[in-house]
Amino acid sequence: MAERSSRPRRDSGPRILVPSIGNPVRCVNGASTYTRELERWLRAPPLEAEVCCLSLPTLRPVRHRLRQSFSLARSLFSKLPAKAIFARSRRMSVAVSRELRDGGYDLVVLNGTDLLWLLDELPDSLPVVVVAHNIEHRLFDVQVRSAEWLPTPFRKHLRGDALRLARYELDGMKRAGNVVALSAEDAVYVERHCGGLQTLVLPPAFGYNPHPRRPPAGDSEPLEIGFVGNFGWWPNQQGLDWFLKRVFAHLDGGVRLHLFGEQSDKGALPDGVVAHGYVPDLGEVLEQCHFMICPILGGGGVSIKAAEAIYNRVPILATPFGVRGLPLAENPAIVVRETPQDWVQFLGSAGARELAARSVLEINSGRFRQETRREALQSYVLRVMGRDKN
């Protein structure tokens, strides 16, 4: 069954149904972090919405890969792209239909473009907002183009599937008419390809008090740097592989890397790398690191973990893509380097120890504070529902 999470019904606020590709309570990736905050903003005053989230349990890695293979095979004989076939779920369909039948909802928020297939099962009178965590067809296209090791006929099929996914995703967002994007770049892209959309750019933001961080490194102390992510997701795998082989392997010691997140403790790692697995308390993560790294080379949306480090005023070393889409002012505690040589040079210099002693400026940290996003989202939701008084 689809898993349901909700709060007791209030008389004052609207009822919002949130079908979600992941469970915001049980999952630990960046999208789930964003979803938890999104629900909190909707429930907060003055909107005080009643939010019901329906999500499916996360598949174990083996079942996930089997379902992917099955979906790719079915896409050979379907008008739908493999990603849409993968995401279709009778259990989700039944759960959504039951809620709508029993419930008097005012709005549906499709949390992820993977759920655009649900548009066919929603009443035309019910407004819909799509949360685009990523532009999935752009993400998939990058993945296909980088898979040069695949046999040519299979790559040809995947390229065709990427085109079908683009049509499916853009047509679905245009049909919904309302899209929340995490980055301005993604919002501009969908507006250019889907005329008449009502969009909102809503970068990640957080409602808890920032955690204390580790004191600066002593002269004889190694630099402790951290990388947080779900290492079952290919952009994080790609980024870690790039960092280990092209950066870390060329350092002359003095730096220790800590990995935090799902599947970070899978497989052999070189000396000087410590894998902690999933650590639920971010404060415990930050206590162990002088600064964080975000060596992401591709993907979509924005890096939630980079945003969360900046919110906690923790210095960060990132690739340009690692901070893509984040609304940042210039700040010496946010260092962006592009090439492996740039990274090696920086991490071997006095600049790295100077970075460890810095704190992110309030002008940047404050841009990821909950209050800066809640009002914008609530105003947008009221406008979509036709209740905006302005």
Image (cartoon, rainbow, N blue to C red):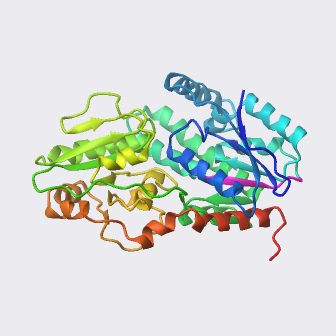
Quadrant, the N terminus: top right
**Residue drawn at point x = 60 percent, y = 65 percent:** 373
Residue 99: quadrant of the picture: top right
**Residue drawn at point x = 59 percent, y = 53 percent:** 37
320 or 220, which is in the foreground?
A: 220
**Residue drawn at point x = 78 percent, y = 33 percent:** 95
Question: Can you give x and y, in whole percent of width and height, for residue 148 in the image?
Answer: 39, 39
**Is residue 77 placed above or below 128 in the rendered structure?**
above
In the rendered image, residue 379 lying in the magenta stretch gets the answer no
Residue 161: quadrant of the picture: top right
Magenta part of the chain: 125-133
Q: Is residue 299 left or right of residue 297?
A: right
Question: Can you give x and y, in whole percent of width and height, for residue 311 in the image?
Answer: 44, 61
Q: Is residue 172 left or right of residue 190?
A: right
Which residue is situated farthest in the bottom direction here?
A: 390
355 or 232, which is in the foreground?
A: 355
In the rendered image, residue 129 lying in the magenta stretch gets the answer yes
360 or 237, which is in the foreground?
A: 360
Is residue 361 visible in the rendered structure shown here?
Answer: yes
Q: Is residue 275 left or right of residue 117?
A: left
Q: Is residue 146 left or right of residue 356?
A: right
21 or 151, which is in the foreground?
A: 21
Quadrant, the C terminus: bottom right
Question: Can you give x and y, in whole percent of width and height, for residue 175 in the image?
Answer: 77, 55
Is residue 195 visible in the rendered structure shown here?
Answer: no
Q: How many marks?
A: 0
